[in-house]
Amino acid sequence: MRALRQSRASSASPPSKHEPPHASFWAAPPEFYIDENMHGRTLRRFIADLGYLVHSPASIFGRERLEQGLRDEDWLPVIGAHGWVVFGRDQNILKREVELRALLDAKVHMFLFPGDVPRQGIIELVQANLGEICTLASARRPSVYWLRPDRVVSYEQRQGELARRRPR
């Protein structure tokens, strides 16, 4: 099931360049999961106010389970089975073998924020890139992406950038 943009004949008007798309802009808008390393409700409220469904670790697994500890290899298969888009900060998920395997097996779309970006910066990154995030999620080709103010960078693009920076 692929999400498609609604036709121009619909009542939804396309968002301006500076305005994130409302969920009604998409025929089948993605649902989002905000990893527990994101803390707070700011991002969840921002996305929900645009009409998207947003899930949190507490809403899916319960507070008691979170207090016991929730490993990436436990939650990733659940989120992947639902096809939800993940927002997180854990850059190390790509470095730890067990977590990387869980990520690949779960086939999720994961969008990573820089670890030091403040709340308002997170909102600005999502606001600037939400259209592309939804488009990538609609393509049903799961991957890991990094959010930047001017664009979304795929895992492959980032690896290429890092390789060009390394001294030979």
Image (cartoon, rainbow, N blue to C red):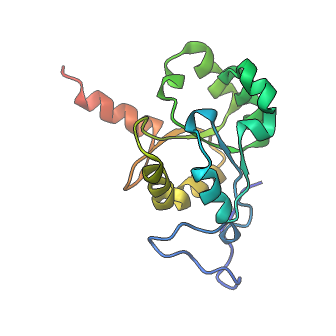
> What residue is shown at x 40% (from left), y 37% (from top)?
116
Residue found at x 50% / y 71%: 19
To which quarter of the image does residue 22 belong? bottom right
Looking at the image, which residue sits at the far left?
A: 168
Task: Report which quarter residue 115 is drawn in.
Answer: top left
* Residue 97 pos. (x, y %): 57, 14
Q: Examine the image and state in which quarter residue 107 appears.
A: top right
Out of 140 and 123, give the one closest to the viewer.
123
Vertical placement of residue 33 versus 30, above or below: above
For this view, does 122 lie left or right of residue 69? left
Q: Considering depth in this image, is 160 or 87 the residue closer to the camera?
A: 87
- Residue 168 sits above or below residue 153 on the image: above
Residue name at image x 69 percent, y 26 percent: 105
Instruction: Work out which quarter of the rendered image holds the N terminus and state it.
Output: bottom right
Location of residue 148 in the rendering, given as x and y in whole percent from the top left corner: 40, 49
Q: Foreground: 7 or 90?
A: 90
